[in-house]
Amino acid sequence: MTRPETKILVDGGDPQETRQVKELLGFVDGQTTNPSLIAKNPHIRELVASGHKLSSRDEMDEYKKIVQTISPLVGDAGVSIEVFSDEKTTPQEMFSQGQEMFSWIPNAYIKYPCTAEGLRAAEMSVKQGVRVNITLCFSQQQAAAVYAATKDTKEPAYVSPFVGRLDDIGQSGMDVVKNIKRMFSKGDGHVLVLAASIRSLEHLLYCFVLQTELATVPAQVLEQWASKNFPMPDKQFKYKSPGKPIPYEDLDLERPWETFDIQHELTRKGIEKFAADYRATLSRPA
Ligand code: E4P
């Protein structure tokens, strides 16, 4: 296979799956996890099904074990670990979780949601050398805010635009990735684009065309890629968008992050769903 320039991360919460993908591809550059994927981890499901629901400390310990098993399996794109947050979580609370999670493994990236609270936590994190991945990003304005909020980072920060969830609401998710790449080409390169919510081989191949630095991909899509003998997009490759085009906006990356419009309905809904999936594994509401 021709190894793509885009780093390939496994989007999942099960170390066994990561091992299988590594065997199939011969490499795995990194991994992303989130509360929904951790709730689906086979061991956690077994515990919950046997009536052994977890305390929030147990859940943290289980999450830690999972990422500690995955950590040595992956390359330099690291393992993204997501803080638990809901609409009431303060930046300081997110940052405290982030600091603890960052100490679990040597190659951690801490995922904070693309909200004002999440960006404040990210600002604190990068000042302390905690690597970040800003998740639940659905717009170019949100990505511009991530750029401005992480200016102090010494290592690249990640921003994760969610492609599939935009497609789900009839918009062209890949357009957001394309627009962010174009906007960042005028920047200093401290934020890398990690295409997320990838649902199909077409999404993945178009990421290669757009030269996203990273893409996180479910095992099922990587298996499809392997079953077709790892095709790469050729000159004829044309991405057929399933949704309404999203126009490019001319944004000044030097503006303070608070001046960008970072509200997005899908960010709010995404936080709610992650919090619900997390709570479903607990013995008492968190
Ligand atoms: C990864 O960082 C994201 O959490 C993941 O790609 C979301 O994917 P989904 O929209 O298919 O849940």
Image: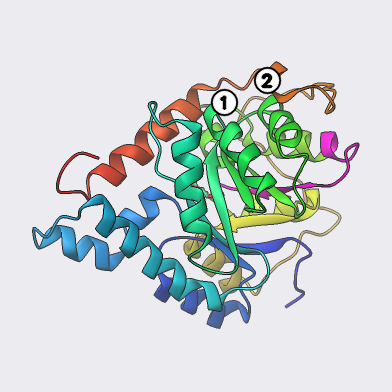
Of the 4 image quadrants, the one containing the N terminus is bottom right
Q: Nearer the viewer, residue 67 or 28?
A: 67
Residue at the (54%, 78%) spot, across then down: 72
Helix, strand or loop at label 2? It is helix
Query: How would you rate the neighbour count of disc 1 (Cα within 10 Å): few for under 14, some for 14-19, many for 20 or more?
Result: some
Numbered badge on residue 258: 2
Quadrant position of residue 256: top right
Quadrant position of residue 215: bottom right
Q: Position of residue 168 (x, y in %)?
A: 49, 33
Q: Is residue 252 left or right of residue 286?
A: right
Q: Nearer the viewer, residue 284 or 130?
A: 130
Please state the total of marks drawn on the protein image.
2
- How far apart in space, not on screen, are marks 1 and 2 (Cα)? 8 Å
Helix, strand or loop at label 1? It is helix
Residue at the (69%, 45%) spot, across then down: 127
In the image, residue 194 lies in the stretch drawn in magenta: yes
Q: Are marks 1 and 2 in contact (CB under 8 Å)?
A: yes
| Amino acid residing under circle 2 | Glu
Q: Nearer the viewer, residue 220 or 89?
A: 89
Q: Position of residue 236 (x, y in %)?
A: 83, 53
Mark 2 sits near ligand 1, with its Cβ under 8 Å away = no
**Farthest residue, direction left:** 51
| Amino acid residing under circle 1 | Ala
Give the residue at mark 1: 116
Residue extent of the magenta highlight: 182-196
Q: Position of residue 182 (x, y in %)?
A: 84, 37
Residue at the (44%, 34%) spot, across then down: 270
Can residue 197 be seen here? The reply is: no
